[in-house]
Image (cartoon, coloured by chain):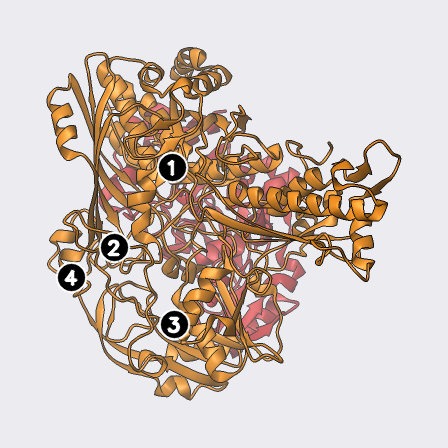
Chain colours: A red, B orange
Amino acid sequence: MYAFEYHRPASVAEAVRLLREKPEAKLLAGGHTLIPTLKQRLAQPSDLVDLGGIAELRGIREEGGALVIGAATPHGEVETSDLVRRTIPALAHLAGEIGDPQVRNRGTIGGSIANNDPAADWPAAVLGLGATVRTDRREIAADDFFTGMFETALEADEIVTAVVFPRPRRAAYAKFPNPASRYAMVGVFVAETDGGVRVAVTGAAPCVFRLTALERALAANFAPEAVDGVTVDASELNSDIHASADYRAHLVKVMAKRAIASALG
Amino acid sequence: MKFGIGQPVGRLEDRRFVTGRGRFLDDLRIDGALHLAVVRSPVAHARIRSVDVTAAEAVEGVVAVVTAERMDPEGRMHIPCLVPLKNRDGSRRADPPRPVLARDRVRHAGEAVAFVVAESRAAAEAAAEAVAVDWEELPAVVDPARADAAAVTLHEAAPRNVAFDWHFGDEAAVAEAFARAAHVTRLELVNNRVVPCAMEPRACLAHPEEGTGRLVVWVPSQGVWLHRQLLARLLGLPEARIRVRTPDVGGGFGMKIFVYPEYVMVAWAAHTLGRPVRWTAGRGESFLADTHGRGHVTVAELAFDADARMLAYRVRVRADMGAYLSNYAPFIPTLAALKVLTGVYRIPAVSYGVLGVFTNTQPVDAYRGAGRPESIYALERLVDVAARELGLPPEELRRRNMIAPEEMPYRTAAGETYDSGEFVRLMEACMTRADWAGAAARREEARRRGRLRGIGMAYYIEATMGDAEERARVRFLEDGTVEVAVGTQSTGQGHETAYAQILAERLGVPPERVRVVQGDTDVMEEGGGTGGSRSLTAEGTALLEAAARVIEKGRLAAAHHFEAAVDDVVFADGVFRVRGTDREIALLELARLVASWRERPAGLESGLDADAEITLSAYSYPNGCHIAEVEVDPETGTVDLVRYTVVDDFGVVLNPLLVAGQVHGGIAQGVGQALLEHAVFDPDWGQLLTGSFADYALPRADRLPFVDFSYIEIPCRHNPLGVKGCGEAGSIGAPPAVVNAVMDALAPLGIRHLDMPLTPARVRAAVAAAGG
């Protein structure tokens, strides 16, 4: 690990100010990607701005029928929240399948989506539910937020403060974990929302994406069989030592069916 | 007796471990210690054009930057391979040198090229990063199956990358048997290469000893003596000038037996600089610099007569040695694997050939089971495949060929003499507990849920190994402690408890009074260390002998004290009594008394303290039956292990809790190899692609089922305790049992064999190819 300056601001405004003053600074949320990267000397930030001391970033609440999850809320709190289980149980389920208890007690939703790891779980929920990402300065629609591998619409000095999830009619997440890391080798989030059916796929490609062909099929028939007529193009998917692109394409369909069946209860 | 042999005594060492008071190497604090960081090759095969240390030396806090030229100007510091082995043509195996620091060429990614010693770990790491090496990268040899045909050779001393071409057996007799066989089953399989992944990474701490000036070297070993011997040889010091110590060790699995380059660097630096020096591997370094295990490509053929009786067995193995021969590497696939080549079956003729090959990968050496898992896996897979081909239930083919108890002692065609074992009895006991008969109904029930369920068995036998000699030394301390020094080394097994139990029973002292001392060349001049499941058979026998001597001395002392004849003194339950009188004295009290005598009678000069040195007449042959039941999700390829039953014969069981712990851990590692673990290398460039836990999959508790473990005690005839080793058994039996179960599940699809690890991707690909 290289040396860095450590800051623990008490407000979002102060954190933003630090980011502006220190162009080589990095935000520290749960640290599950950043700390290992630092330990392996793969990153050399001048400063770390720890978001753990900012109370306004943490917590889960209802707001005009939507569910608002503070960016620094750990996965474990989402997993066990009565409010989440009552309103959007699929999110509690998704949170409960991230990593292991240690990870869930430290990792945060804001850190996960800001990092936008291709195999992270939260991006599937955010895109699948058509959520809105709230930052210190604006609101960003999920469809505009995830722009590429480890890339988002966030500006360099912009901080995610919360994610606003509209309540779907029904939704579910089915994940096929990587046997080693337990990140999603393929994860499919399916939701029937007021704005239509949405299907988001994580783990399979360089960036979370919507499977629009399946969305159309499900709009006509929200049933597992709808998946059968959909083709998943393997040429755009990831291939690695754990899974070929063809296997991932196959898993997308299997997980989609399971998510739909689960959403139907 | 509450704490005696056979009792489930809770582990005495666990209070220390679970309250965080274990002292592992990195916990040792020593003032002013310098930190050592290793400069490792980023490539698997390259010539070193130059090494520039200028920038590294300029880093603040750096004390020394050391290259091969500096450490070893004459090029003599080579870590030796200690196993002599003859090729089939009578010539000796290749013996290419393994330098501590690479001089002009690196042969695996992670090989050490230089090291830095600095005042802090951060400075050492920063300077290590600043060492500039100019590499001329070479093509890498990666696949052991094709290493001898590669265009590139690793070592001048090993043409065609062949380390050895070894053979055992009677090829002509085997060929004759195959010619007249009614049926031959042939199987090609891979015993996947794995990384040991001990919870505690390797480390080393060395410092000059105050007063004596000797070099004290701390390593997390499985026995300190090999380290003293080789460090002395490499540093050019007499062994008496080096003291090696081992504190608590967090898992070894064979991998911590060996002497590694880093230990030589740390010891050399401490010796040369006259200051304490330490190094602790990061997890990434563990993947790159620990020895790996297994790595066999095998062709096995079994010939049967018309009654499905085994006639002959032919096995050809290509064993991946990695880039260099580690201390015992050539022994593992050859003589160690040979011990149980024929398993528990009557096979009259064998031909076993092993081609050891060099590849541009980490050196491979012993890993839990060390050769015996490889042999049992090949044989037990082959037996299952043969049973299917012959149209026999797998248990019937086994039953028909198993060596019967009345044939014991039985000399196998591989040259081992099994002393005892009731294989059919254990197999049937395991089948009953596993409800083998009900498996068909469970398969049908699973099928209705869309799952493919299968059941598989494996019958393993192990031959324990290692030094047949062992020592024990019992000392009665003033405070009433019975200190026992041993030549073995616990790496988590619970030796402190096991040995205390033996002494508690034999000497009638409370086990908490017994203190086991291990891991110090000053305390024990020689010892066999722990490995090959030898500790209880060898050390247990030495402890019995030491206890017997204590009792003999005690009778002498009691006779002297009570002015009675020695023959009238009897010992029972910790008390010496004079027959026919009410005169008696407890052992510990007697020990204190004798210590206080100004003048001691002949034979009691050292009080009741006693040393023992024993040689086992032969090894032990633990064996047993594993039955696994799995459910395969044909859509994803996921294998769920849903039921696991094991019935073992470990001879007399000293402590059922300790044994269960060994069995559970061994099975977890075996299941890991069968389903998850795989050291994957880039096929062209030799990089380890599974170099962290993000890519190298270890088994986790939530994926393992409850293990139904039981045992049948058939005493070993080769040691007075009647014990057989249990440390490696689980990792031997589990892989074939699990794979046989998965193949049983997939049999309806016509799938005959898949290689480990049976990952979802691999299983799904096979299901898809079979039209599922």
Instruction: Rate crowding at label 2 as few (under 14), some (14 to 19) or many (20 or more) other CA atoms within 10 Å.
Output: some
Q: State which tag comes first along the sequence, 2 or 4.
A: 4
* First along the sequence among labels 1 and 3: 3
Quick one: SS at disc 3?
helix
Q: Position of residue B662 (x, y in %)?
A: 53, 38
Q: Are marks 1 and 4 in contact (CB under 8 Å)?
A: no
Same chain? Circles 2 and 3: yes
Q: Report the chain holding disc 1.
A: B
Circle 3 residue: B234
Per the model, the C-alpha gap separating discs 1 and 4 is: 33 Å
Of badges 1 and 3, nearer the viewer stands: 3
Disc 2 is placed on an element classified as: loop
Q: In the depicted view, which residue is nearer to us: A149 or A170?
A: A149
- Does residue B770 appear in the picture of this structure? no
Instruction: Specify the quadrant of the image occupied by residue B698.
Output: top left
* Cα distance between the residues tagged 3 and 4: 27 Å
Chain of the residue under the numbered disc 3 shown in the image? B
Whether residue B682 sits left or right of residue B399 in the image: it is left
Q: Mark 4 = which residue?
A: B153
Amino acid type shown at disc 1: Leu
Q: Residue furthest right?
A: B582
Spot occupied by residue B609 in the image (x, y as percentages of width and height): 69, 54
Residue B242 vs residue A214: left or right? right
Q: Earlier in the sequence, mark 1 or mark 4?
A: 4
- Where does the N terminus of chain B fall, quadrant-wise? top right
Which residue occupies 12% across, 32% down? B172
Do discs 2 and 1 belong to a common subunit? yes
Q: Quadrant of the C terminus of chain B?
A: top left
**What's the CA distance linking mark 1 and mark 3?**
41 Å
Find numbered disc 1 in the image and state the secondary structure of the residue it sits on: helix
Evaluate whether residue A147 shows in this view.
yes
